[in-house]
Structure formats: structure tokens, C-alpha cells
Amino acid sequence: MLKDEKNTACGSCELGAKASFQRFGLNTTGFDFTLALAGNPNTGKTTLFNRLTGLRMHVGNWPGKTVTQAVGAFRFGSHKYRLVDLPGAYSLLSRSADEEVARDFILFGKPDATVIVCDATALERNLNLTLQILEITGRCVIALNLMDEAERRGIDLDVRSLARDLGVRVLPISARSGKGVPELLQAVGEVASEQGDVPPPRSLKLAPEVKKAVEPIEAALRELHPGLLNARWVALRLLEGDESVIAEIRAGTLGSAQHGIGGLVA
Amino acid sequence: MQILQLHNEGSDRRRLMDLGFTPGAKITRLQTSPLGDPIAFEVRGSVIALRQDQCDQVEVKPC
């Protein structure tokens, strides 16, 4: 097994030295796990996507560049991964179309792991979305990207404390140079392979009256959609009057295959 | 400038806060469009442009 892996490893790339790594481009057949790349606009999601899949999706340094999700694949160690590059989002609670794509995939596409790509030079801004994702699922790893740029600007980040406070693994990387990427993939692989539910590390703390209102809705949602990742989160959106979620419940499309890319590639 | 408070609610408020315009945040006016609207601000390490009606909802003080 080990020997085979060595034979197929890409010897010339920087990841090959650490573990067997192979880019599959658009060929996503026979994957073991699905990964999502989420993060604020312009944090390097597509740069990381291209590095891992060998594809050349357009990288632009303006927000709103990726409006739909791109899909590619790679192999790291003994598993093949399907990687979904989501549009950049500041929030999962907004109503713009590209942010809804990101939200729906994380919530209903059920990736085996979500890589939250953060800009190390503007971490404060990135934590809003990060916390929102961590309220939905614990199947997350944080890629602290642009570490080289942060170092250049004299920004010193306490990665260990950050990981402890957020409750998920945090890996410093530079998607541009590839530094830290093998370690990131190692962590991502471990999260993706975890069996069963991985509860969100950040729980939604609710006032008693909100809790009382949300619980019956949550129970009804569970009955209606047994496979729903986080019924409480959806119930809260209904209470807030989130029109897109209401429309999906009315149409019966909540959490259906069209949200995932299952229908698109299978 | 520093943001004192936001005078709006619902999804408009949510949107501004998601973009980093939260009470206490420091913002710098960078550029103004030729017609005066929108205006670009630096906030929490990024440049974000707001329309006049959004600007009207943000109360600031000099800092």
C-alpha cells in the first residue's frame, strides 16, 4: 500500500514530499469525501482550489468573482476528495444570491468537511462568517491564509489560542506558495473521516422565550426533513422571516439534491 | 471616524454589520464617486463602498 502510494506521488510538487498527492482536475469520479471551501470574498479560496485540483479557475481580487460553485478533485494519502469552491460570503444570513449558494451548500450539501479560508491580515473581519459556520457544523477546519503577507506586515497571530477558543483546528497556510498546505490536508482528512455527527463547537445561546418559540418548529422540521444537518438553525431563520428559506419549505425543496452538486456531477 | 450606532433594523442592519460596520469599528473615508455616491470606506482591513442611504444610517464620531 505504502509502496503504491509512493509510486503515484507527484514527486516534483511540494506536497509530494510530505505525502502522496495527485491532482485530478475536473475528474471527480469515485471520490471518498466532499470538501467545501468557504470564506469571505477575496481570501484565496480559488487560489487554494486551483493549487489542489490543478485547474485554472479565474482568480480575481475583487469580491463577487465566484458566483457559482466550481468543482474539482484531488487525492491526498489514500483518499480521493471532491472539492467545491463556494462563492465568497460575508455572512450566511444575508440575501444575496451568491451568499445563498454558499449557505445552502454548507447546510444542505453536507460536505464531509468545510475548509473555512480566512485572511490572516484581516482576521477580525473573517471571524463573523467563521462563527456562523461553526454554529452549523463542527466538520470544519480553518485555513489561515495569506500568512506570508501577514508576516510581512508584522502581524503576529496566536494560532494555538485561536484554535482553542474556536474549538476547531486552525492551520496557517499560504495558498500562493503552498506553504502549510500538506498539514492542512492532513487535518481536513481527519475531520472528513470522522464518523457520525460532529456537533457545532459554537452553540447558539438562546433567550428562554426564543427557545420556547423555536423548539416546536425545530421538532416539526426534523419530522419533515429527517436528514437536515441543523434543524435549529433553519427554525431560527423561519422565525426571522428569511424569505428564501420560507420559499423552499413551501416548495418542498429544502435540502433537496439540487442544493448539493450531487445532481450536477453524479 | 468611529461608529457610534446604526440607525436601522432588520436585514439592512444585518448587512451593514456583516460587512464590518459595527458600533465601535473605526472607519476611514477613502474615495468618493464622481457624483458623490457611493462612497468607499476602509473598515476592518477591507474597502467597502456604501450608498448614500446606507451612510445615512451610520452615526459616527471623530476619533
Image (cartoon, rainbow, N blue to C red):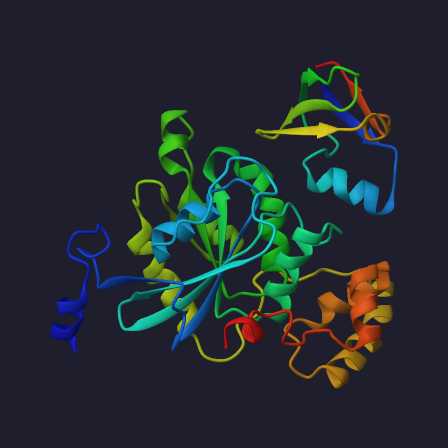
Q: Is residue B53 above or below residue A251?
A: above
Closer-to-camera residue (A224/A31): A31
Q: Where is A181 relative to A203, above or below?
A: above
The part of the image, by quadrant, that contains residue A256 is bottom right
Question: Residue B10: x and y, percent?
Answer: 86, 47
- Give the residue at x 18% y 70%: A5
Quadrant for residue A175, please give it: top left
Residue at coordinates 84% horizontally, 59% vertically from top-left?
A240
Measured along the vertical axis of the image, is residue A140 above or below residue A65? below
* Residue B32 x %, y %: 72, 16
User: Can you see residue A219?
Assistant: yes
Q: Between residues A65 and B59, which one lies in front from this camera angle?
A: A65
Q: Residue at x 31, y 48 (%)?
A: A180
Q: Is residue A76 above or below residue A121?
A: below
Q: Is residue B4 left or right of residue A151?
A: right
Q: Position of residue B35 (x, y in %)?
A: 79, 16
